[in-house]
């Protein structure tokens, strides 16, 4: 009996310790951060260029848009940059990465602006000036983006042509959005280095960064997320959503990405039956494809867009 009690106590102790570790991991990954973390050492060589784009963004003529303005706990924020040509009917909706915000996508905003687009830069839940205690990794954000699309069409008109563009978490956000009933004005999607599912991405990072196994931590983290945000992590899947996608989509991924491995874009590519293209960028790490050669990147984008925009 004594040995049995010791075993029960040890099992309960191990379960309690696993839960506490899972709670710590959840907060570290999902809790809102009200600042943009420093970039990796490998990308600091792009800092001077990056800050020039931010300076352009800050000085640009723009409008501050909101959703759910009546409720500050749910209010979503976005910046809208009108095109040079007031008669433009093309809008690029740009989705930012993990712990970023609309401003951190200034280089892409300028690229699309110079291509003649209006640009909308939302702050996702738990990021920037949008509300939210926790990061939803694109899953709840996809529903907010449906509202942003509605707002764009109301502003620009029914003959608007919209493209969805995202990098990293933003790529997964627009991929997951594609599985919803998006308006006909959405003509194509570009997803740069997105994950195939949050489960697969978290398990990759759990092993790579913490050398921890999937069990028992993943079920605890998923349960905590369900309690806080209302869904299990198994629901957050680009692959599942892309199976319902009917919008042309272009996947981009760095060949040497060690944060979101490039095989995830292959999984996303295989999942959709819509017109699709895939570009694996040689020598590029995570979210580096643009920075390695921005002109080549822009040309790939333009060639894709030319097939689907008037």
Image (tube, rainbow, N blue to C red):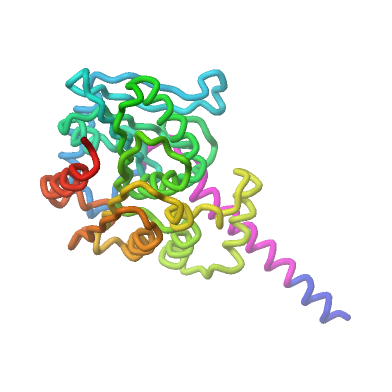
Residue 146, position as x, y percentages in the image: 45, 34
Q: Is residue 31 magenta?
A: yes
Q: State the residue in front, 62 or 99.
A: 62
Side of 236 relative to 196 (left or right): right
Q: Quadrant of residue 53?
A: top left
- Vertical side of 284 occupied by 189: above or below: above
Q: Nearer the viewer, residue 229 or 306?
A: 306
Which range of residues does the magenta coloring cover?
A: 11-36
Give coordinates of residue 309: x percent, y percent: 23, 38
The image quarter containing residue 255 is bottom left
Outermost residue on the right side: it is: 1
Residue depicted at 32% across the width and 45% down the height: 189
Image quadrant where one finds the N terminus: bottom right
Give residue 157's position: percent from left, percent from top.
34, 22
Determine the residue positioned at 55% across, 18% down.
70
Instruction: Please state which of residues 284 and 35 is positioned toward the viewer in this rendering.
Output: 284
As drawn, 101 above or below 193: above
x 50%, y 50%: residue: 28
Q: Horizontally, is 72 left or right of 310 in the view?
A: right
The C terminus - image quarter: top left
Provide the major secondary structure of the magenta segment: helix
| Horizontal and vertical percent position of residue 199 | 50, 60
Above or below for 163 versus 218: above
Is 268 placed above or below 212 here?
A: above
């Amino acid at each position: 009996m004594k040995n049995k009690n010791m075993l029960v106590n040890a099992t309960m102790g191990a379960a309690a310790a696993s839960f506490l570790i899972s709670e710590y991991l959840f907060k570290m990954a999902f809790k809102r951060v009200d600042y943009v973390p420093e970039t990796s050492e490998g990308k600091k060589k792009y800092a001077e260029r990056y800050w020039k784009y931010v300076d352009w963004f800050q000085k640009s003529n723009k409008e501050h848009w909101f959703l759910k303005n009546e409720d500050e706990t749910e209010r979503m924020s976005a910046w809208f940059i009108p095109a040079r040509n007031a008669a433009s009917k093309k809008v690029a909706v740009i989705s930012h990465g993990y712990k970023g915000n609309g401003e951190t996508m200034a280089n892409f905003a300028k690229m699309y602006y110079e291509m003649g687009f209006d640009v909308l830069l939302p702050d996702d839940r738990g990021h920037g000036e949008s509300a939210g205690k926790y990061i939803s990794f694109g899953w709840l954000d996809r529903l907010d983006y449906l509202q942003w699309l509605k707002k764009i069409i109301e502003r620009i008109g029914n003959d608007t042509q919209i493209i969805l563009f995202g990098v990293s978490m933003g790529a997964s956000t627009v991929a997951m959005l594609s599985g919803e009933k998006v308006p006909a004005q959405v003509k194509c999607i570009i997803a740069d280095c997105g994950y195939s599912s949050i489960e697969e991405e978290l398990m990759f990072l759990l092993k790579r960064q913490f050398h921890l196994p999937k069990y028992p931590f993943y079920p605890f983290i998923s349960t905590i997320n369900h309690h806080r945000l209302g869904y299990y992590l198994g629901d957050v899947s680009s692959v599942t959503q892309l199976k319902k996608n009917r919008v042309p989509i272009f996947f981009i991924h760095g060949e040497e990405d060690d944060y979101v491995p490039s095989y995830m874009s292959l999984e996303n590519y295989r999942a959709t039956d819509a017109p699709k293209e895939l570009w694996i960028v040689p020598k590029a790490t995570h979210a580096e494809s643009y920075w390695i050669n921005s002109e080549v990147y822009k040309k790939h984008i333009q060639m894709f867009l030319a097939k689907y925009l008037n």
